[in-house]
Image: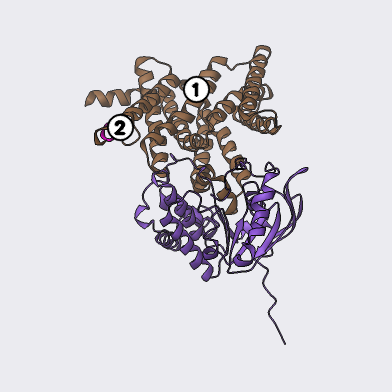
Amino acid sequence: MTQTPPAAPPVEVSGLSAGYPGVLALQGVDLRLSAGTITALVGANGSGKSTLFSALLGLRAPLAGTIRLHGKPPQQARRRNLVSYVPQHDTIDHTFPLTVAQMVMMGRIPHQGPTRRPRRADRAAVAEALEQVGLAELRRRTVGELSGGQRRRAFLARSLAQRAPLMLLDEPFAGVDRGSEELITATLHSLRDAGTTVLVSTHHLDSLTELADDVVLLHRRVLAAGPPSSVLTESTLAGAFGTVLADDDRADDRTAAPSGGEEAPWS
Amino acid sequence: MELIVEILAAPLQFAFMQNALAVAVVAAGVCGLLSCWLVLMGWSLMGEAVAHSILPGIVLAELLGVPMAAGAFVFGLLAVLLIGGISSTPVIKRDTSIGVVFTTLFALGLVLISRVPSQTHLQHILFGNVLGTSRTDLWQVLVLGLATAAVLLLARRDLTLLAFDRTYAHTVGLSTAGLSALLLVLLALTTVTSLQTLGIILVVAMLVIPGATGMLTCRTFGRMLMVSSGGAVFAAVSGVYLSYWLDLSTGGTIVLVQSTLFGLAYVFAPHKGMLARLARARRTAAAA
């Protein structure tokens, strides 16, 4: 009996430690995603979510362990357009002279020749992506002229136009309005149904069951992983957000503010 | 009408004026292009640093009998490497590192000039000497300037993504370190190209003001490139003519014309200009 060898999983992380020696943001993390699924990465501020994304993108070298994206190290995976990324923070310059359509066109760089001259296929992909996130009519606005939720959708459109088989999204629901949240969720579902693998970090626990096929609960280590119903139990959540939260949060996230004890971390 | 033709044509009967005009136009055009990325990346100070740092390179090049541009380019790169090296120590911030490196290299240049018997006038290096452009200088500027402009335009989309969103540039497989290095090399080349026209002190003006003018007037980057380089070329042409007829410093006049363009844009630019902002504020106040 012949069997086609199973394709390499979209994300395979084993024994990953990252951070600085003595201040480990991640310690012995194992993670394996199956193709065509949505996995939610859940954890408090300082749990290592951003560090994990940096490591997956090859922005930060692991102290130990290996990362494979579709069987390739991150560096090669990026060059072969195997991974796309939707950033969390609005760190972009709001005065940058760039229209929404031009920004989304940047997602086409892996498909273009050395001078990145847009071809018909590129224009079509950009138009389709803008349509999908409901920004077709705003495509001539500059990026700075969008609302927060619209801008998040524009970044999503850029990754859609990139058409990579794995998409990482860092807190796409933080600070967006209800309409944008629903639109982003629907877009991720249709991406998954078309075979794309999605890893999305989020604080929004209430809509997780709706959003994700799998949940990974992170606090420097993987505390629990599996379908939402089995992971989102009181005791595992207490482990991620309650008791463990009390100890140091300094280990991670240059960007994350040190979280106070009183505030619910998922609010 | 005849008077205008006379004003424009008369200076051009002199070869030195033809050379001056050509050199100034090419230098300003390249500065205007590069300026857009420097302004968006927040690298204005870097432009200043590279310009000042090439002084010892010019003196040494003359001493060794190699082309001035080569010496200048080597020291421009040396400055960039030193700045990057020193600011990679966690204690020293980047602007501090820039301040240390370029003043040191500039001082080294001054000391060298005081000891090395030289044909080059410090005055000309510092403030430019576009009316003294030789045939060789002209060719050097044309080749370097056009090559720099060509590379900038070919790599423009990648450079713009680098300036806009570094992490995403990395994600789509671009080498952000490589692109930054490319931009710095082009900065060094542009400085060398502009030396004859503007001199070490004023180069930074044309590396910053055209892009800033473009930022005020344009909504898209393509427009900004056109306004920035177009405005810089206009400043160069009018600067050369004004300085001829009124007997003014050419480099200084070019920069003042460019500054005037900036001032006009600051006040009158649609959307982002001062008047447009005031009108908007008044409308908002009236509506409230």
Q: Residue B248 appears in which quarter of the rendering?
A: top left
Q: Residue at x 54, y 44 (%)?
A: B162
Query: Which mark lies nearer to you, 2 or 1?
Result: 2
Numbered tag placed on residue B281 in the rendering: 2
Residue A147: percent from the left, percent from the top? 40, 47
Residue kind at label 1, given as amino acid type: Leu
| Host chain of mark 2 | B
Establish if A5 lies above or below A247: below
Residue holding disc 1: B202
Q: CA distance from mark 2 to mark 1?
A: 37 Å
* Magenta span: B279-284
Q: Are marks 2 and 1 in contact (CB under 8 Å)?
A: no
Task: Give the mark nearest the N terminus, 2 or 1.
Answer: 1
| In this rendering, position of residue B75 left or right of residue B228 | right
The kind of secondary structure element at disc 1 is helix
Establish if B191 lies above or below A142: above
Residue A208: percent from the left, percent from the top? 55, 61
Numbered tag placed on residue A12 in the rendering: none
Q: Residue at x 51, y 32 (%)?
A: B141
| In this rendering, position of residue A114 left or right of residue A34 | left
Residue A40: percent from the left, percent from the top? 59, 60
| Host chain of mark 1 | B
Q: Main secondary structure of the magenta part?
A: helix
Q: Nearer the viewer, residue B19 or B44?
A: B44
Residue kind at label 2, given as amino acid type: Ala
Q: Is residue B22 visible?
A: yes
Chain B: give its colour: brown
